[in-house]
Image (spheres, helix red, strand yellow):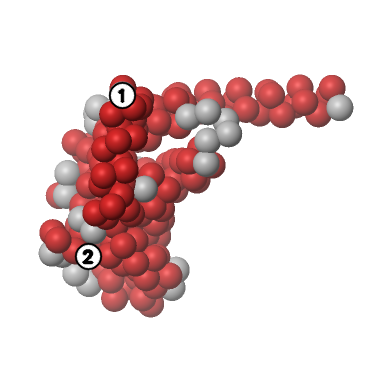
Amino acid sequence: MERSFATDANSALSSARAIGRLSLSEPMRQLINEDPHNVRDLFRLLVYWSDKFVMMQYTRQDDDASSSSSSHHNNNKNSNNDNPQILLNIILRCAFCLGNLTSSNDSNRKFVVLRFGGDNSMGGILSGLTASYMRENDDSPEKPLLADTLVKLTRLIANICINREAAIGLAVSTGIDSLGSLLMIVIENEKEVRVGVSEA
């Protein structure tokens, strides 16, 4: 995949949407799986846009005034490349596609981790998005989208771990322990729901 194409938000989102629809069908998945580079390119998109989103969130947190000025300038040039909801949609759809492509193909599970660098980057993606979710206010427009993205990413990780070798590779990935933090969030949210119901 051409770098100029992959690093343009509009192009990346359109591609991920199209492949996502195709990946819902097993015959189409088989066609996609014929070339491992398709999985590689999707994973590279996931890594690139996840890193960009997390870095943008940190920049916004560190210096809101400076970030606002910078975003305003960049938005005039390419608004979607700095739109957090667009970036999250790209990440979500890439994770969804890869989740479909690893649901029934054992080779793809190993490819992502052992051949395309998932053992080095998957944990970082998970921990970065988890930290972003925990920092967002409840009324933030990004929070529901972040939650959906983390669901798709967790599904991808679960599918990959069906393969023993890939699971071992992910187990030592720095940041993969963020799955524990996600579990605690789910437990706490469930408690809040139960308390709300009992008080109603």
Secondary element at image label 2: helix
Image spot of residue 188 (x, y percent): 60, 23
Image spot of residue 98 (x, y percent): 34, 56
Q: Quadrant of the C terminus?
A: top right
Left or right: residue 148 versus residue 2 is: right
Mark with earlier residue (1, 2): 2
Which quadrant would residue 138 be assigned to in this image? top right
Question: Eyeballing the image, is 37 above or below 48?
Answer: below
**Which of the two discs, 1 and 2, sits closer to the camera?**
1
How far apart, in angstroms, are the residues tagged by discs 1 and 2?
38 Å
For the point 25% across and 27% down, which residue is it?
Answer: 174
Three-letter residue code for mark 1 = Asp
Question: Eyeballing the image, is 46 above or below 173?
Answer: below
Secondary element at image label 1: loop
Q: What residue did someone put label 2 on?
A: 38
Image spot of residue 142 (x, y percent): 48, 41
Which quadrant would residue 22 be assigned to in this image? bottom left
* Disc 2 residue crowd, few under 14, some 14–19, many 20+, Cα 10 Å: some
For the point 26% across and 44% down, which residue is it?
Answer: 73
Three-letter residue code for mark 2 = Asn
Q: Tell me, for residue 191, which label it has, or none.
A: none
Whether residue 185 is visible here, answered yes or no, is yes
Q: What residue did someone put label 1 on?
A: 63
Left or right: residue 127 versus residue 137 is: left
For the point 77% across and 26% down, which residue is it?
Answer: 196
Image spot of residue 88 (x, y percent): 39, 47
Q: Nearer the viewer, residue 68 or 53?
A: 68
* Disc 1 residue crowd, few under 14, some 14–19, many 20+, Cα 10 Å: few
